[in-house]
Amino acid sequence: MFPLLAELDILRHQIERPVQERLTKALCSLITATCKEPELGMFLTRIGAERGTKIKFLLDTLIRPYHDALLPLLKEAMREGIVPNQPSDILCFMLTNAISITVSYRHILADYEGDMRSIESLAKSMNRCVLKMLFAR
């Protein structure tokens, strides 16, 4: 997942590209990276219930870096009216958690949505859903 941080940082600074294009790429890359680490959502859920050094590690190593990398793109998209204005920290947290939990729970989702056990099928469906949800008017 850590190479994703570098990619998000590059996207954040490519201001010559439209923000919707950069945010789309960032979210699709987040989904791809999460699909390569499908147990991440379960890990975040387990450690997120902890207190003390484990939660500090989780915040400092996994949550805050991705939050800080994605948040500027979301805020820019809101300023430009591409994404509806809303609490940006909550949106960022909801997006990243929805992506990681959905990947981790794909075996349950398969009962509702068919062949979601395949990471490739799941990633394609998630890309379509998150982009339609975020950019819908």
Image: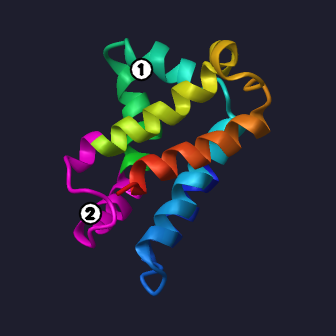
- For the question of whether residue 123 can be seen, the reply is yes
Dot 1 amino acid type: Lys
**Residue drawn at the location 73% of the way across and 22% of the way down:** 114
- Quarter of the image with the C terminus is bottom left
Q: In this picture, is 27 found above or below 76?
A: above
* Residue at 76% from the left image edge and 37% from the top image edge: 121
Question: Image check: 35 left or right of 115?
Answer: left
Q: Earlier in the sequence, mark 2 or mark 1?
A: 1
Q: Report the quarter where the N terminus lies.
A: top right
**Left or right: where does residue 21 sit relative to residue 136?**
right
Q: Which residue is mark 2?
A: 78
Task: State the residue position of label 1.
Answer: 54
Image coords of residue 73 (percent x, y): 37, 63
Q: In the picture, residue 117 is in which quadrant?
A: top right
Which SS class for mark 1?
helix
Q: Magenta residues? A: 68-90
Question: Residue at left 56%, top 18%?
Answer: 42
On residue 15, the disc is none
Q: Label 1: how many residues lie within 10 Å, few (<14), some (14-19) or many (20+)?
A: few
> Is residue 2 within the magenta segment?
no
Which amino acid type is shown beneath numbered disc 2? Met
